[in-house]
Image (cartoon, rainbow, N blue to C red):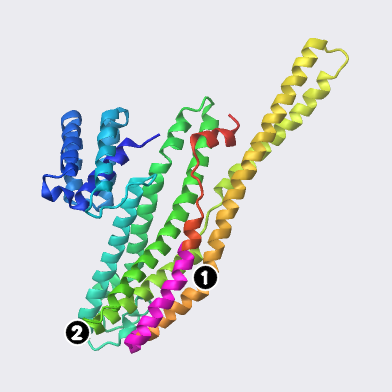
Amino acid sequence: MIDVAALIVSAIVRAILSGALKAGQSAASDGFTALRKRLVEQYGKPVADSLSKLEANPRSIECQNLAIQRLQEAGVDSDPELAHLAKVLLDMLHNSPDGSPSPGTADPVADLQRTAGREAVEKVLQEHIRRLQELRERRNIEDIDLLTSRIQLNPNLPDDIKQRADTLHSRIRDIVRQVAASIEDARYRDAEAAVSQLPTGLAERERAAALVQADKRIHVAYETLRLTVEFFSDLNEAILRGVDDETLPAPQRANMMFGNAIMIYELTDLVIGYVQDFSLGDLHSKLYADSRQRVQRLRERQEELKRKALNVNIEEPVRRQTLENIAARETAFDALDEEWDRYLHEIQELAGTVAQIQGRVPTLELIKENAEIQIMTLQVAAMLRFLRQNSESLQGAVRTLQAFRLAPLNSTRLRQLLGV
């Protein structure tokens, strides 16, 4: 089912970022106006206010999520005309010559959120580097002592500088986690809604909710890891393009080399820490064990029931019906076990993919140490070689992560795993 709210927000954000609205006379501009007019006239002030905030800051993840939430609360998912207007606008943007991104993705808002997240990480790093460059000019301090792993050890630096440096990695992690959580929240809306509609008792619904949340946490953790490595790789590519610009004056080029080396070091250090600490958790395994125990107890009771049914004193029609019921339930139990086995196999495949990335930690450690030495030397030629080597190593990690796609738990599979 199409997420109409997400589709609308994607169309609005793409229209704003594409620049197609500035001309005011384009078909995309007319399409945007038609879509926005219907939203405001049909759904009122809360929606209009959220759209105004989104238009003022279209790259903001918070504004995108707020607009989606307000649209969902207003009930736009049941408005086919809005879905049509949003699709038409996306088609116009896709076919326009303004270089706007292609909307041909299954989750258009996720792409926008990734872009916003990557830019937010870059902004945090650039601000950090700017402060360090100012610090270099004002204080007698070795460049190597400006790294977050060493800055706390310097007794001559003020506490506010130490505090900001100490929170650099946590701020970046928060951004990446927020993007990952936003993406997975949208993907799990169907499964979470299905829990409340299960034709079971409260205990079974609570088990279903726990299973959905365990599966969602796995996906959020993996998406966070994937985005961390992906953002790292993208920023490294941007750095490489920047240092290749030989037209820059020597002082500016030297500052860029310093900033780039700092960025590579901090990003590598962050990725290493996240990869080493990565965990899928074990709640899904506990739920699996609980399911197997319950099924095993039912199988044992069925065997006892079968023995009773074979008693010579049982009337034949009742015996036959009971044995048919037992056989049908056995088939259902087998199907439930098979579905759990498939589910856990997929999670094991995910763990294997993560293990491949964890196996790259020595390579990342080498990149980090290389960057540390580069900060002290800042030779242009060496920097270029280092960045290109870094790029090749990272692209392998990105391809490994991107090649694996663990399907999110949907309502159909939820019922299969629960046997309902």
| Residue 381 sits inside the magenta stretch | yes
Q: Secondary structure at mark 1?
A: loop
- Looking at the rendered structure, the kind of residue marked 1 is Arg
Q: Are marks 1 and 2 in contact (CB under 8 Å)?
A: no
Left/right of residue 287 with respect to residue 223 in the rendered view: right
State which region is magenta.
Answer: 375-398
| Residue 64 sits inside the magenta stretch | no
Q: Which mark is residue 249?
A: 2
Query: Which quadrant would residue 43 be assigned to in this image?
Result: top left
Left/right of residue 7 with respect to residue 366 in the rendered view: left
**Identity of the residue drawn at 52% across and 36% down:** 208
Q: Which residue is mark 1?
A: 360
Q: x and y percent of residue 387 in the render?
A: 38, 77
- Looking at the rendered structure, the kind of residue marked 2 is Pro
Q: x and y percent of residue 15 in the render?
A: 21, 47
On the question of residue 69 being in view, the answer is no
